[in-house]
């Protein structure tokens, strides 16, 4: 089985975390394409523009931080899961928040996975390596033919 190209959309406002995630995902999965946004509004605009194009392939997943200025990660998640165009995009919360109430809330809103950022550099890198390995063998959704955005 040939590995699929990893197209990751990253919503992360911390420059250090974003650099760490991008570098390690690209190191573990050469050819991985990581597109980063610093806020929820920008990521929603990007995803809607990309997926409203005819035949556009959805990203492999969205790695979504919770704490961001403006539209936070939980609101991005809520909007995505209520939008027929975006709801099939897998959303993995990647955040420092490990509060059980927050974890439950994200799953109730429809996230596919909840990953807590480890504190140590080595543990964080190991987590990203395991995530890339998992994604390379996973079957992921493709855009169904005929799906149109409500405003299209």
Image (cartoon, rainbow, N blue to C red):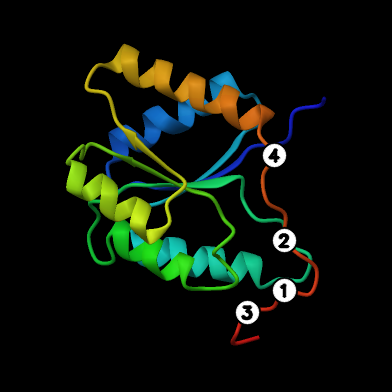
Kindly tell me whether residue 38 is visible in this rendering.
no
Quickly name the residue at label 2: 143
Label 4 environment density (alpha carbons within 10 Å; few <14, some 14–19, many ≥20):
few
Earlier sequence position, callout 3 versus callout 4: 4
Quadrant housing residue 135: top right
The residue that appears at 51% across and 73% down in the rendered structure is 83
Q: Nearer the viewer, mark 3 or mark 4?
A: 4
Most foreground residue, 107 or 5: 107
Q: Which residue is mark 3?
A: 149
Q: Quadrant of the C terminus?
A: bottom right
Mark 1 lies on a secondary structure that is loop
Residues 148 and 41: in front is 148
Q: CA distance from mark 3 to mark 4?
A: 24 Å
Q: CA distance from mark 2 to mark 1?
A: 7 Å
Q: Quadrant of the N terminus?
A: top right
**Cα distance between the residues tagged 1 and 3:** 7 Å
Crowding around mark 3 (Cα neighbors within 10 Å: few <14, some 14 to 19, many 20+) is some
Q: Which mark is residue 147?
A: 1
């Amino acid at each position: 089985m040939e590995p699929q190209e990893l197209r990751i959309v990253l919503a992360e406002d911390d420059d250090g975390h974003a650099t760490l995630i991008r570098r390690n995902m690209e190191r573990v999965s050469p050819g991985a394409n990581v597109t980063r946004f610093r806020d929820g509004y920008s990521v929603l605009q990007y995803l809607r523009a990309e997926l409203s194009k005819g035949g556009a392939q959805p990203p492999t997943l969205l790695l979504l931080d919770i704490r961001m200025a403006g539209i936070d990660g939980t609101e991005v998640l809520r909007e995505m899961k209520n939008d027929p165009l975006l709801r099939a995009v897998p959303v993995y919360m990647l955040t420092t928040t490990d509060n059980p109430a927050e974890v439950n809330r994200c799953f109730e809103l429809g996230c596919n996975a909840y990953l807590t950022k480890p504190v140590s550099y080595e543990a964080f890198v190991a987590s990203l390596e395991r995530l890339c390995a998992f994604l390379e063998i996973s079957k992921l959704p493709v855009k169904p033919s005929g799906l149109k955005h409500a405003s299209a």
